[in-house]
Image (cartoon, rainbow, N blue to C red):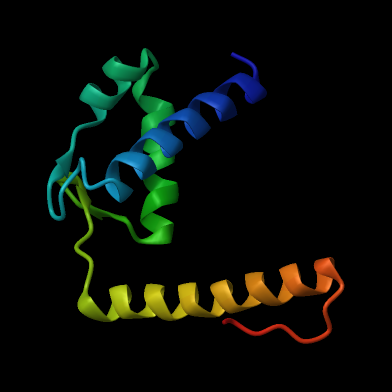
Amino acid sequence: MQRAERTSRKQLAYEVLRDRIISLELEQNSPIFEDDIATRLGISRTPVREALAALERENPVRMVRGKGAFVSPVSTNQIIEIYHVREVLEGLRKSIRCVRLGFFYCYDK
C-alpha cells in the first residue's frame, strides 16, 4: 500500500472520529471500538489506531492500557477556555472585516 493511500485512510478515520466526538455522537467516557470503526469505514484497523493515537495527543481520546480507547471527559474549565478563545476570535474576525471594508474604526450598533 502506498504511503499517501495509508495517510488518507488515517485522515478519514481521524476526521470521522473527531466529528463523532464533537457532535457528541460518541459520549464522554464511552469506549471506541477499533473493529467497529474500521468495518464502518471499510479500512483496516491500522489507520484507525493511528487516528486514535493522533486524537490522544490532542486530548479528545484517552488510551487505557489493556482496555482500549475512550472518549475523554470535558471539564467545565475546558468549556470556559473554549468560549474565551471563541470571544477573541470573534473580535478578530470583526476587526479583519472592518479593515477589508476600508474602515479604520468599527463599532457595533
Q: Judge from the rendering whether residue 106 lies leftward or rightward of residue 74; answer left or right.
A: right
- Give the x, y percent position of residue 74: 23, 66
Measuring 55% from the left and 72% from the top, which residue is drawn there? 90
Tell me the quarter of the picture where residue 106 sits.
bottom right
For the residue pair 49 and 32, the one nearer the viewer reads as 32
For the residue pair 18 and 61, the one nearer the viewer reads as 18
Q: Judge from the rendering whether residue 58 lies leftward or rightward of residue 91; answer left or right.
A: left
Residue 71 versus residue 103 in the image, above or below:
above
In the rendered view of the protein, which quadrant contains the C terminus? bottom right
- Give the x, y percent position of residue 24: 22, 47
Tell me the quarter of the picture where residue 76 sits.
bottom left
Q: Judge from the rendering whether residue 16 lies leftward or rightward of residue 86; answer left or right.
A: left
In the rendered view of the protein, which quadrant contains the N terminus? top right
Residue 20 versus residue 22 in the image, above or below:
above
For the residue pair 92 and 69, the one nearer the viewer reads as 92
- Give the x, y percent position of residue 102: 87, 72
Measuring 38% from the left and 34% from the top, which residue is drawn there? 16
Measuring 40% from the left and 27% from the top, which residue is drawn there? 46
Tell me the quarter of the picture where residue 93 sits.
bottom right
Residue 91 versus residue 55 in the image, above or below:
below
